[in-house]
Image (cartoon, helix red, strand yellow):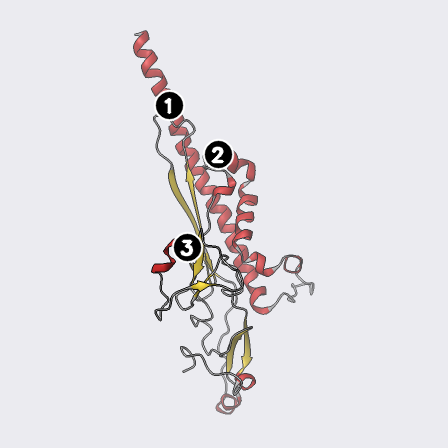
């Protein structure tokens, strides 16, 4: 009986430990999902400032302190999401739980912000491992996601008389360095779909028109690791926040750009 107990009791203890660790794994996923939801909600909120400018006032007539003190471009970056998740969930907690690699191991490469119809899609990929990797499950890949729409408001169509409709001037959209104007705010050229690929696979990647991808002159990506491309561009980027990927969109009257730049080939009609 002593021999049998010496064999069975350790297995029983390992079994109980892994059951408890499985519960901790579920708790960890819930905490990261909650932290990701908080970060996504803040990005959706600050999208209003990114769209209409940071000189917006609160209900008391004072400029929002958060909007004034934080860079809007930083808020819309992966660095901000990473910092907010660690801050919300707690660095000490993440480093002491079953999260493999600690708080710095969570990947956000599959996240996208404002890629079509002002959608904020945050994706956190991470691995969890057993406390005692003996007679335990292998490392498990988990994913937490946030999916929301930026709080950019809704412009309801005003009811105009026929005379007012004639006088109403069309509004179009332009970018800071763009050479055409757009009639559709959701045009793919204004909201590029960004995806991450490895540098080694670039030779097999082609844009929508069949072009190969060249290195971006702004962010100067290296020859290793992960880069970012769009289906309608012909450059690859080392940073998702590169100016070649980010679009600063302004709404202007058609008369201001008519004659100076041509319409977009997709939405210019």
Label 3 vs 1, first from the N-terminus: 1
CA gap, disc 3 to disc 1?
A: 43 Å
User: Nearest the camera: 239 or 168?
Assistant: 239
Q: Is residue 25 above or below residue 16?
A: below
Label 2 vs 3, first from the N-terminus: 2
Q: Which residue is mark 1?
A: 14
CA gap, disc 1 to disc 2?
A: 17 Å
Q: Residue at 53% across / 36% down in the picture?
A: 93
Front of the two marks 3 and 1: 3
Front of the two marks 2 and 3: 3
- Would you call the spot at circle 2 few (<14 residues within 10 Å), some (14-19), or many (20 or more)? many
**SS label for mark 3:** helix
Q: Is residue 42 above or below residue 169?
A: above
Q: Residue at 48% across / 60% down in the picture?
A: 237
Q: Which residue is mark 3?
A: 199
Q: Is residue 68 left or right of residue 51?
A: right
Q: Which residue is mark 2?
A: 97
């Amino acid at each position: 009986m002593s021999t049998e107990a010496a064999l069975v009791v350790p297995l029983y203890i390992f079994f109980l430990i892994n059951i408890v660790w499985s519960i901790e794994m579920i708790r960890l996923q819930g905490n990261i999902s909650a932290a990701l939801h908080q970060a996504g909600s803040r990005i959706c909120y600050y999208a209003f400032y990114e769209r209409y400018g940071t000189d917006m006032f609160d209900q008391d007539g004072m400029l929002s302190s958060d909007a004034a003190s934080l860079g809007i471009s930083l808020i819309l970056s992966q660095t901000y999401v990473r910092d907010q998740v660690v801050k919300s969930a707690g660095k000490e907690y993440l480093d002491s739980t079953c999260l493999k690699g600690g708080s710095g191991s969570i990947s956000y490469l599959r996240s996208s912000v404002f890629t079509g119809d002002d959608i904020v899609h945050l994706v956190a990929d991470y691995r969890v491992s057993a406390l005692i990797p003996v007679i335990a499950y292998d490392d498990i890949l988990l994913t937490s996601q946030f999916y929301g729409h930026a709080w950019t408001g809704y412009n309801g169509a005003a009811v105009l008389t026929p005379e007012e409709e004639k006088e109403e001037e069309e509004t179009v959209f332009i970018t800071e360095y763009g050479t055409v104007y757009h009639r559709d705010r959701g045009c793919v050229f204004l909201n590029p779909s960004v995806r991450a690929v490895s540098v080694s696979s670039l030779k097999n990647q082609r844009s929508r028109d069949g072009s190969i991808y060249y290195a971006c002159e702004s962010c100067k990506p290296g020859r290793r690791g992960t880069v970012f491309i769009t289906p309608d561009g012909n450059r690859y980027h080392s940073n998702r926040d590169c100016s070649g990927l980010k679009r600063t969109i302004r709404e202007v009257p058609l008369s201001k750009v008519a004659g100076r730049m041509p319409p977009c080939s997709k939405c210019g009609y």
